[in-house]
Image: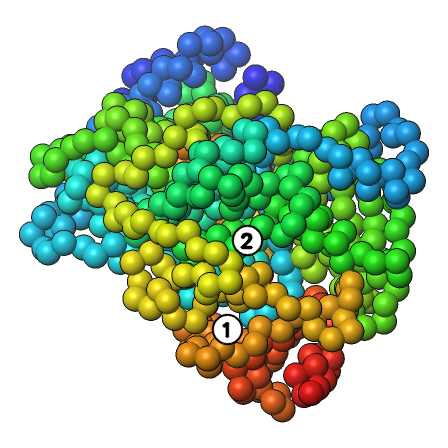
Amino acid sequence: MGSKDGDGRTMNDSLNRRSRNGPDMDRVASGGMNRAWLRWVPAVAVPAVIAAGVLAGSIPARAGDPLPDKTPAEVIALLAGHRTHTFSGTIEQTSELGLPELPATGPTSGPASAGGAASIMELLTGEHTARVYMDGKAKARIQVVDRLAERDIIRHGNDVWFYSSKDNSAAHLTLPAHARDLPLTDPGNTGTPPPAAPEPDMPVPPTPQELADKFLAAADSSTAMSVGPAVEAAGRPAYNLLLEPRAEGTLVGSVAIAVDAANGMPLSVAVTARGAAQPAFSAGFTSLSLDAPDEALFNFVPPPGSTVEELQFRHPEHVPPTGVPGAPGMHEAPDDPAGSIKAKIRPYLDGTGWETVVEVPAEAGAASAANTLLSRNPLLAQAAVAVPGGRLLSTSLFNVLLTDDGRIFAGMVPPERLQAASTAP
Amino acid sequence: MLPSSARLGASGTPGAEAGAAPRGSGLSLLWSELRVLFGRRRTWALLLALAAIPVLVAVAVRISSTVPPGRGPAFLDRITQNGLFVAFTAMLVSVPLFLPLTVGVVAGDTIAGEANMGTLRYLLVAPTGRVRLLLVKYAGALAFCLAAPVTVGLAGAAIGAALFPVGPVTLLSGDVIEAPEAALRILLIAAYLSVSLAGLSAIGLFLSTLTVVPVGAMAATVVVSVVSQVLDQLPQLEWLHPWLFSHYWLGFGDLLRQPVLWDSFASNALLQAGYVAVFGALAYGRFVTKDVLS
């Protein structure tokens, strides 16, 4: 320990200084200053090293081997043809859509504790993490990781379980035999859109697969497709498929889909608004393992003390029952706009591709779907501003118009277009 | 005078050769530091106060009506079904204030306490060296960081087992683990909290080298922890959040998932290591250049 005699000397100096206060104090002090300067070196060096490390870490790592060049069509073929149904990974979703942030989460309160009402808004703001485990097409588990809480969806064969740790409630659904690929995300399911399955009010962040399917479906002939420089996602080299709508009437500037170079799996999707530099929404794997997950993960038994509710499978033409399990009003108007739009989707007018506007018509009996939606989602009501003809939920990527007569219009288009659609005959 | 004399006895006579300090003297100094720290009535009072938290929680739940799900701190509604949840609830409620408070007292006292009692001089006359003394003092603070969450966890498990039935524990994922594994998770969470408090201890150690008034260093340490947590709540400062030492303090819930999510443990350990390095270096710079007059 080399500093030891130095320490002793400093001590002696100080003792000397106190006792003598002599004329050579200046020399001692300057000598002390010299050493003192050296002693502060670590205090400066450590933050510098940390800063350098952070900077080095923020530079995206280059893939080791350059990927063989592929045309956009080849990358799309790779994506469409992938057969990876067994994996486990962590998905992170980030949205900066310009919606008001939810109140900061404390240990005792948070988005999850606010129940279903906040869930829709919650998924559209901030960051979310979900762990996904898939083993083949019939076994899946999604864990939405909240602070000190978790929401789980477990599918094993035809049994689907929903579990929320916040209120220790579980819900069970038995799928009909023909619904092989329902209702969880199913990579490779490129057939007809699946009928809406009843789900408790438990929105789950979409997987990159679902997003990639959705955006590729929206891509029409007017979309410029290109393959950008290779990227790395979840530590795997990937092709960067870029979709740029040429249509003027959409808010979407570009969509970047990272396609695993080895197996064609979509690893991340980032959507940038027109004219923006940073993605407004992105979802992607931060870690991915292609090993089969532990079998025990798919065997869910409702824990002791939990409330269990049995859900009935309904056909899509019916209003899907939504709501927190056990909550009243199961058969009222849907309070999940995404779900209801999925259930009753009706492409509107001439809108195609990126400019599609979907309309949820007002229903007899549930005439004010939009009003119910607003009254049951105070946060949504707060975010929706009054415009001529209704209320508008405006984000940088999409707009939702809730008209006064109870219809809902939504699309990745400017609000004027929704208003035009709502007033059109 | 008692601490210094005890330590001098353990680490050799004050007049020993500086260069001839045996390698074991660091260990014996650490041993005597731990003996002094845990021999203090104050340390025991702090640990007892921490142990009182789960007792209060358990008794309050026991004598009150059933807590409806979703109300109060997480896990509170599970206590009546399973006493082990007392440990989780108590550790949760002690994270924001009680643990930083006790750690602040211990860490703020490290150097300033000796200086205040006038014993720091004598410690340095002994062939220890300032660096070694600093390391030993920090090790002592770390030992308390280890003891404090373990105290809360064990006291919680004990009082929970005494007042409520104990059985399989439902994790956040809805999976159920047996009581022995649950005990392991309690210890894991205690370890997580110990790591979480390491950064705060380093800050306390640095603040303690700045002053000879231990109360000042203690208060400053506690204030720093509160300020960090307040900043962590402000959405406008989102860019700063991952850099705040209190950012992952409540992340221990990830240890209650199935399978265990280690991400926050790793991020937390890295962050705390950074704080230990920065404030350790600052404390070193300050302490070895300091004029020790008392």
Residue type highlighted by circle 1: Leu
Tell which circle, 1 or 2, labels the residue nearer the N-terminal end.
2
Residue A166 or residue B131, whichever sits in front = A166
Q: Is residue A396 above or below residue A69?
A: below
Q: Chain of mark 2?
A: A
Nearer to the camera, A231 or B277: A231
Residue closest to the far front:
A178
Please tell me whether mark 1 sits on a helix, a strand or a loop: helix
* Residue placed under numbered mark 1 in the picture: A380
Q: Residue at x 31, y 21 (%)?
A: B32
In the rendered structure, find residue A195 and report the number of the disc placed on it: 2
As rendered, which of B167 and B206 lies closer to the eye? B167
Name the kind of residue labelled 2 in the image.
Pro
Residue A90 image position (x, y, % from top left): 57, 38
Quadrant of the image occupied by residue A325: bottom left
A402 sits to left or right of A198: right
Q: Quadrant of residue B139?
A: top left
Q: Relative to A69, is B126 on the left or the right?
A: left
Looking at the image, the residue that sits furthest to the bottom is A388
